[in-house]
Amino acid sequence: MRFLTKLFLCLAILLALIPVTPIFADAKSDYEYQYGQYRQNYIEYTLLKKDFLANPTLDNQQKAVLAAKQTISSRELAKANYAEYLLSLISSSNVTYAPINQIIQSLTSAKVYYTSEEQKSQSIVTPADLKTFTADYIANVIEPDRSFRTGDIAYKISQLVNFQVQLKNSLDIILPKLATPLSTPLQTKINDLQTQGNDINTMVDTFTNKLYSDEQIANIDSENYFSDKSETIKKIQTLQLKWIDSLIDIDVNYAHS
Amino acid sequence: MPIPKLEITNPQAIELIGKIRSGEIFTPILAWLKKNRWYLVAVGVFLVLIIALVIGKKLSETAQTPTFTPPDIETITPTPTTTVQSSYSGLKKNIQDLNTDLPDPYIPTFDNNIDLETSVN
C-alpha cells in the first residue's frame, strides 16, 4: 500500500513537471474541426429523426430533439468559424481597402449572429422550441449566409489589391535607380506602366463596387454568381502579370546597368 | 738462354703431325661442312637475326621513348555572360499562383431547416 502511494506521488510529480504544450489552432483548423462535428451530429440527427417519425414515442422524441439541438449548436459554431476563417484570410493580405469594408463588416456581423444563435439554441428543450427556433432562423439567416459568398470574393479582391500595392512600391523603388535624364523609350515605358497601373486600380474598384449593386445582390444566390466574377479576377491577374513583365524589363535592362 | 730443341719421338704424334701437315686430317671435316653447308648458312642467318634483335632491344631500352603531343586545337572560349535576375520575379510568381476560381475557399453546405416535422430523404 505504501509502495502504491509512493508510486502515485512520483507519477503526480512527474506529470506536474512535464511542460504544458501550447496548442496553436488557426482559424482554418478551427473551422474544419467544427464542420466535422456538424457533419457527425447531422448524421445522428437524421437517424434519430427517422426513428421518431417511424415510432413517435416520448423517448424517441427526446432523443431526436437532443440530437437536433446538438446539430444546430455545431452548425452555428461551424458557420461562425467559417466567417472567422474568411476574415483571417482577408486580413492576411495586409491591405486596407475601403470598398471591401462593407463585406468585412457583414462577415463580422454574421459571426456575431451565428455565435448568438448557438447560445440561443441551448434553450431548446421541446419540439415546439425547436420549431420556433428553426422558423426564426430561416427567416433571419439569409443575409449572414450570403456574407460567405461576398466574403470569398472580398478575399480575392484583397489579394489583388495587395499585389497592386506591391507593384506600385516596386516601381517607386526602381525609379531612383534609373540613370537620368531618362531616354525617350524608357520614359514611355514608365508612363505606360503608370497608366496601366491606374487602369488596373480602376478595374478593381469598379469590380468591387459592382458587388453592391442591386443586380448583383438579386443574383447572389444563383449558381452562376461566381462565374463572371472569376473571369474578371482572371483578367485583372493577366493585366498585373503584363505589368510586372514590363517592370522586370526596366529593372533588368535599365536599373541594373 | 738458348731454346731447347723439341724432338718428337712418339710415332702416333708423328703420324698426327704428318696428317695435319698434309691436310689429311681436315678432309672429313671439310666433307661434313660441304655436305651440311646450307644448314650452316640457315643457322648463321638465324643467329644473325637473333643477335640483331637482341642488339635492337638493348638500343631501344637505352633510347628515350618519344612522347607524342597532338597539335594544339584552337578552342572556342564562350564569352562570359552575366544573367541579371530581377528581384521582382518572386512577386510575379505570387501573382501567377493566385487561384482565380471561385468560391475559394469552398463554402460548406448546411441544413438550416432542422426540425422534427418534415421527412428526411
Image (cartoon, coloured by chain):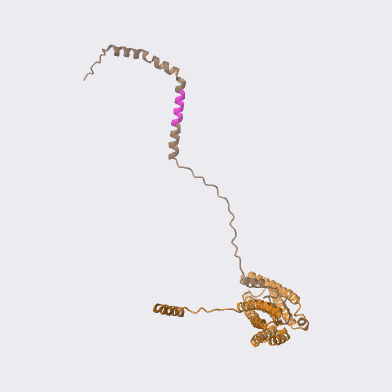
Chain colours: A orange, B brown
Picture coordinates of residue A194, whole percent (x, y): 70, 77
Up-down relation of residue A38 to residue B80 (above or below): below
Location of the C terminus of chain A by quadrant is bottom right
Picture coordinates of residue B96, whole percent (x, y): 67, 71
Of the pair A94 and B79, the residue shown nearer to us = A94
Quadrant of res A83: bottom right
Specify whether residue B19 is painted magenta: no
Q: Is residue B75 left or right of residue A198?
A: left
Of the pair A14 and A129, the residue shown nearer to us = A129
Q: Is residue A4 left or right of residue B82?
A: left
Q: Residue B18: in sight, yes or no? A: yes
Up-down relation of residue A208 to residue B22 (above or below): below
Of the pair A134 and B109, the residue shown nearer to us = A134
Up-down relation of residue A55 to residue B31 (above or below): below
Location of the N terminus of chain A by quadrant is bottom left
Quadrant of res B10: top left
Picture coordinates of residue A247, whole percent (x, y): 66, 72
Q: From the image, give the main secondary structure of the stretch colored magenta.
A: helix
**Tally of numbered tags:** 0
Q: Residue A94: in sight, yes or no? A: no
Q: Residue at x 72, y 73 (%)?
A: A234
| Range covered by the magenta-colored residues | B41-51
Q: Is residue B85 left or right of residue B44?
A: right
Picture coordinates of residue A195, whole percent (x, y): 72, 77
Of the pair A29 and A198, the residue shown nearer to us = A29
